[in-house]
Image (spheres, coloured by chain):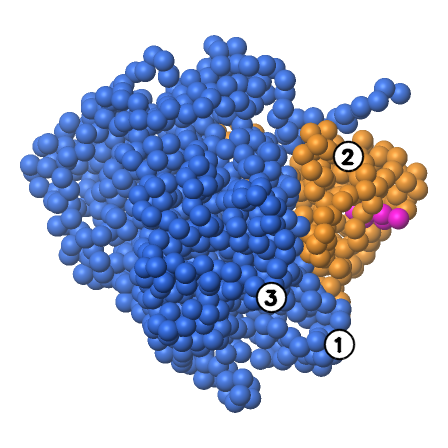
Chain colours: A orange, B blue
Amino acid sequence: MSETTPTNKPQWAMVIDLDRCTGCEACVVACNVENNVATVGAEEAAKGRTINWIRIERYFEGEYPDVRVKFRPVMCQHCEEAPCEPVCPVYATYHTDEGLNAQVYNRCVGTRYCANNCPYTVRSFNFFDHVWDAPLQKAWNPEVSVRSRGVMEKCTFCVQRIKAGEAKAKDENRDVKDGDVTPACVQTCPTKAMYFGNIADPTSEVAKLSKSSRATKLLEDLGTKPKVIYLNEGE
Amino acid sequence: MKRREFIILTGVGATSAGMLSACGHPEEKLIPALIPDDEYVPGIDVWKASTCAMCDAGCGIVVRTRDHKANKIEGNPQHPVNRGALCARGQAGLQVLYNPDRIKAPMKRVGERFSGQFAEISWDEAIKILADKLRDLSAIGKANSVHFFTNDRRGMTAHIATRFMEAFGSHAYLVNRLFNEDSAISGFLNSYPFVNKPVFDIANATFLLSFGARFLETWHSPILYSRAYGDFRRASGKVRGKFVQVEPRMSLTGANADEWLPARVGSEALVACAIAQVILREGLAKNTPDANFIKSFEAYSPENTAALTDIAAEKIIRIAREFAKSDRPLAITSSTIEMTKSLASLKWANFLNLLVGNINQKGGMLLLEKDYTFPLAKLDLPNGFSNIDYFKFPMMIADRPCEILMIHNFNPAYVVPATKKKLKTIPFIASFSSFMDETSELADLLLPDHTSLESWDINYAEATSEFIVNLTQPVVKPEFNTKQTADVFIALSRALGDKVAASISFSSIEETVKQGFTSFAKKETPALVKKKAAETDAEEDSWKPLSEKGFFINKLKNNPAYELESHQLLTNIPLTDSLLSDAYEDQEYPFALLVYEHPTLGVGEQANLPLLQELPDAMTSVMWGSWLEINPKTAAQLGIKDGDVVEIAVEEVAIGGDLRTIAQFEPIQLPAVLYAAIRPDVLAMPCGQGHTAYGRYATNKGVNAVVFTIGSAGNKRGILRAKVKRISNENKLIRFGTNLPEHIEIKR
Ligand code: SF4
Ligand code: SF4
């Protein structure tokens, strides 16, 4: 786990309002398209080999007829104390000074230790080279590399959009502000359940929302210090 | 355009603007739909505005393209329907454009009829073949045996086809959606011709009572209402709204409710009546009908109806009070065939809105004046066309002479497999589908249409108090050798000459759309056109700003006259429904069967998109297949476990409790899902799968549930009853998350 060094770089974080989220999965498809996430087909899917950077968890509570359902979008939590990082023998997964848990595809040798150590099971392994039936590959996002067999992958908080947003702020000679960076999932969400921004900036929306009495983090007691904050239902 | 505006317009801004800033103001040249090669800057993102075609809601989109390829679709941030958001279907739109199973060029049949063997031909030849056939028929006075069907409900194809077909001497038909919310709504409002389709102000409501309306998935305008739902829950300065859903099987929408009332199948209207009765007897109504009505309405008390609805009277009374006493109560309902007796529930749910007086109020039901003119009126297109319901198709082709069938994006061989036999007796079939679907397989001539992202079109959408005219324009050049169907009609009309040629005066769909859109916009929003035109060179005039924006708005007025009418309406509601009389027990077929529209695969139109096939169903996690939902207690009694293969036998019985069977179906087998949120006396299955054609991703996945909804072949509609038994424990379900540990095939 990384030594935390003081930095004036932005610290990227996400807030998800579970009271707004309807479980519609628009974010899932948006992510797949933006990040060239492969579809594996029925046969491989049956073996549990789908690639998912974000998933919607669903919980049934109670018994008929008093059933209630809860949804929760789960992606890489970009933990400050990420359990996946120290177990990588080749330093393919590491922490950036902007608080991102990054993955270097061409360094990854596919031990899958990181996936085993991730308590949120958000890492997907490429068990084989994916076939993109032509011309489906024309829809690839040229800003995002396509992963091949033997490589681990996961949510990057749309790092390509972060880089573009930072470049724009730099061009304009200012710090990044809300709205500079919008990951694909956040942008498409029909109910506006997701927020993204620099949590180190106290005026940012995510910084404010993270102080809400409804704020929680997933499996917080593991000490992973996630960078994704969930707002529960209720007042 | 100022750069700032451009950034707002394109939404993401981040990516595009960062790169653009390095090279002057290329955005001045970016937006026109097709950019000449010499002006194209390699490696630079170009955003183009258009309209989503994945359902009928009409969300605005902006498409990111680079080097002539489209690589992402986002919601148009300015568009009043979706304000930058898109649903799962909308996000998958690029896989329609780049689908490997598109029909790539015009083709004619070469093998035996129905052999599915085709050879590529030129467009000239294809049009000549069809024109010759049409001319020959016309010459022997059989023009009226040519029929055109389309399910393009949004755009101009139906208009142009109608003009053509009428001049030729026959008809074009527009096929309604299978799960059609619109026609029933307009049926309800028919006596009020001054109103448009109602819009519901869910965002500002404080209590939402929904009778089976899946407004977060498939109802009217999924994004418009999802956005409203977000604010309904948590807009700042507003109390958190309460949401109650009445439906026998909990949908994704129902899963978001604070309370779920699993009323018996077909009893939604009765629940609404029982709630209304409490409101009336406790004097909680803002508008009251006359005393006679209230008296006769006593029969619908929660105490009297509890046995029929299976909802305890105390619960109804509590909800009725909460509803009526809430600041801004609102009732909504589905009117699709997913609900038996949907027309009755439409009526009685809206009766609740009248009682609490929310018509044209904040947080209520908004009835908007129908004062717009049809945007293409100038171009002299027909204003109306013949609509038919999905399930009437078999009757229609059985009833009348049919020598040539021309079919566009409508797939009867999938929806009503039984009509395949009849289709095969038609001497000549021309398909305009972009994909080799079940019906195109039977065709003699294939004239593949462009997909929406390559097409020109105009259509509309409705959003709260606004009427929106949407532009569809190509975001990339056609991927294959396809041709927009409207242009095929223009070419056919020229080939046929005379009055058919005269029926279509313009020379291309592109010209029609540009002219129609501009002239209408000029009239409706002169300010926009003028201001923008002044900034650009005169030649580009008003088209460019419009095409950059992708839509324009026509504000509608709430109708003041309506207030006066609502009291009258209250007294006019007759109590003629046989709501109290038709519960029955059926020993042999003990379950009611619900067949519902899949949230993302629809009625099978989207089954050919791998992104959506592999998207786990939100409620069951199933991918790439069909399933049958059973209550766990019922399943235990029948010895059925999660994932077991079961067989269901289905029959359709007449409404009214006389148990007369009107259709019987072949039993089908599929995997069972134990589903905690369904009534024990109900089974449910989604539509969307069971294709036998329609490309590699759709073919042979799951079973076709649509067949059950069309059973009585367009006659009287009834109730579906089913029985189920376990066949084997061979688990064929493909599910996300249930088998995360890696599956090892070879022992090491
Ligand atoms: S798009 Fe938004 S509402 Fe839909 S599942 Fe994702 S977070 Fe939830
Ligand atoms: S709601 Fe309909 S129009 Fe809007 S994005 Fe989804 S599919 Fe497209």
Q: Which residue is mark 3?
A: B475
In the image, B498 versus B306, the foreground residue is: B498
Mark 1 residue type: Ala
Q: CA distance from mark 1 to mark 3?
A: 24 Å
**Residue shown at 46%/17% (left/top)?**
B724
In the image, B395 versus B621, the foreground residue is: B395
Q: Is mark 2 within 8 Å of ligand 1?
A: no
User: x and y percent of residue B633 in the render?
Assistant: 47, 14
Residue B31 left/right relative to A225:
left
Residue B132 left/right relative to B122:
left
Image disc number at residue A118: 2
Whether labels 2 and 3 share one chain: no
User: x and y percent of residue A28 in the render?
Assistant: 63, 45
Q: How packed is label 2: few (under 14 Cα within 10 Å), some, or many (20 or more)?
A: some
User: x and y percent of residue B571 in the render?
Assistant: 12, 44
Say above or below: B223 vs B705. below
Q: Are marks 2 and 3 in contact (CB under 8 Å)?
A: no
Q: Which residue is mark 1?
A: B22
Q: Chain of mark 1?
A: B
Mark 3 residue type: Val
Which residue range is magenta in the image?
Answer: A101-106
Kindly state the secondary structure of the residue where label 1 is placed.
Answer: loop
Kindly state the secondary structure of the residue where label 2 is placed.
Answer: loop
- Toward the right, the furthest residue is A90
Mark 2 residue type: Cys
Q: CA distance from mark 2 to mark 3?
A: 41 Å
In the image, A125 versus B98, the foreground residue is: B98
